[in-house]
Image: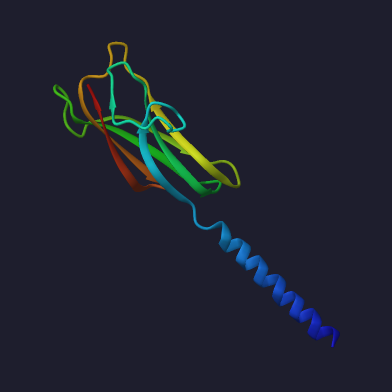
Amino acid sequence: MKLKKYSIWLALFALILAQLACAAGEPTLSNVRTARDEDGAQAASTFGAFDTIYVVTDLANGVAGNTITSRWFFDNVPGFESGALIDESTIDVTEESFNGTVYFFFPPQTDGWPLGTYKVEVYFNNVLNSTVFFTIQ
């Protein structure tokens, strides 16, 4: 009888552990947006020539080893080749567990951003997750 009770408790414990492991879920990158601030509260798609541009995203269930990469391109900017890479930056998650906002920023050059449309691709673990566009007016 003791062995049967022990087996039931062990099975129940294993079931609870399995449910807790699944509750955390897979790491997910969502809500990619351009903004005027690092927390993404001031979402915008149009900026001035001397604005700093933020690309903000939300990471849920992030774990150590996850990577988020942004690749910034000219899209339709007079005098620049469409699709030319401007900058690339990667953030590595180092915490065992991370839920929160991740951001990239690109300050203007000394003489400001050239007027036109730009594109930013955001990759999660080396897989394209989202593409966002912004305009400099």
Q: Residue at x 50, y 48 (%)?
A: 60
Q: Residue 73 appears in which quarter of the rendering?
A: top left
Is residue 96 shown left or right of residue 89? right
Taking the view exactly as shown, the residue that stands out farthest to the right is 2
Is residue 86 shown left or right of residue 96? left
Q: Residue 2 appears in which quarter of the rendering?
A: bottom right
- The quadrant of the image that shows the C terminus is top left
Is residue 46 shown left or right of residue 105? left
Q: Residue at x 41, y 31 (%)?
A: 104
Indicate the position of residue 136 as horizontal and vertical percent values: 24, 23
When the figure is inspected, residue 132 is found, relative to residue 117, above or below; the finding is below
When the figure is inspected, residue 8 is found, relative to residue 89, above or below; the finding is below
Taking the view exactly as shown, the residue that stands out farthest to the bottom is 1
Q: Residue at x 74, y 75 (%)?
A: 10
When the figure is inspected, residue 113 is found, relative to residue 88, above or below; the finding is above
Indicate the position of residue 127 as horizontal and vertical percent values: 36, 49
